[in-house]
Image (cartoon, rainbow, N blue to C red):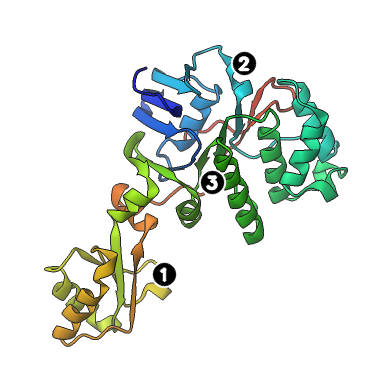
Amino acid sequence: MSGTTGLALATRGLRKNYGPRRALDGLDLSVPEGVVYGFLGPNGAGKTTTMRVLTGLIHADGGKVELLGKPFKRGDRRRLFEVGALVESPTFYPYLSARANLRELAASGAPVPSKRIEELLDLVGLCDRSNDKVQGFSMGMKQRLGIAGALLSDPKLLLLDEPANGLDPAGIVAMRDTLKALASQGKTVFVSSHLLAEIQVMADVVGIIAAGKLVREGPLKELLSMQGVVKARVRPNLVDAAIETLVPLAPTERLTETDRDEGWLAVHIAADRAEDVSQKLAGAGIYVSGLESGNDLEMLFLELTGGQTIDGEGTFIGLGGPGNGNVTSGKDTAA
């Protein structure tokens, strides 16, 4: 594979079929070192299949994968000692404590100093519950413990599928801060998530896939700068007239996904041209009662994926889980 210098993760022409259905159709990803990379796609786009290929749980039917500058091939499981991964619901020994579970995970992989376990329990906020049996943990606590497990070997590359599953708002913010801090230390964090707003404030680079293919990839700020949007609110009975008025200025559509969107329009125009939108409507005798502008990852996502919904159901892979060597998996679905 050529042209991957400076990349922590790269795929080229990745293909995977499940019977007659093609889950991955020539997927090309280029994940730079030392960034938080947001991996997005609608339900069934191939996100989980990609994560499973990257962690060796399944094998691609074609294409190449490169992890940390080296090819990753069938049977190359020891390479995963350099990678931390959490994909699907974390699996632990229920009758062991959080600390004991981490010790078991550590014993199945590369050598881990005992102080590393204590550092990670502190990092994920589980010091006070470290001696409690995992069977009494909430989903969010298990998720945090799973992330601690993924970080045991101090990996340079971290692969996380829906890491915010089960976390409350404070936990999500703490997760975001932790992942950004890891990237600032030079680690690469590859995050698959359905929380578009969270990815927008956390990710440095974004890759969006649809139908197993990459449809857009690049620095988030650059992608959003090309996706300006002005949202205007008018009286609901004037929405059609407002759209007709604004279409010559820029593509315009109504926002009707929720009751809160009643009367709101999305005008695909540079965010600093909100005044032009207001003036155009006023010239037609239509006056706005609300006006917002900005760069919206959700709008970009919907445009690139044809309005498909994003997958809110995550799946899990943890390195060194009970009874499965270095990688464990939950359900086996084609996602």
> Would you name the residue on which mark 3 appears?
313
Q: CA distance from mark 1 to mark 2?
A: 49 Å
Which residue is found at the position 64% from the left and 54% from the top?
174
Three-letter amino acid code at the position of disc 3 = Glu
Q: Amino acid at mark 1?
A: Thr
Left or right: residue 182 versus residue 208 is right
Which residue does the numbered mark 1 point to in the structure image?
Answer: 258
Q: 268 or 209, which lies in front?
A: 268
Residue ID for mark 2: 78
Answer above or below: position of 166 versus 80: below
Tags 1 and 3 touching, CB below 8 Å:
no
Report x, y in % for residue 85.
60, 32
Check disc 2 and give the amino acid type: Arg
Is 69 rendered above or below residue 155? above
User: What residue do we see at 50% from left, 23% from top?
Assistant: 67
Viewer-proximal residue among 220 and 306: 220
- Place of residue 80 in the rendered image (x, y in percent of width and height, measured from the top left): 60, 22
- Residue furthest to the top in view is 75
- Labelled pair 1, 2 in contact (Cβ < 8 Å): no
Q: CA distance from mark 1 to mark 3?
A: 21 Å
* Viewer-nearest residue: 127 or 59: 127
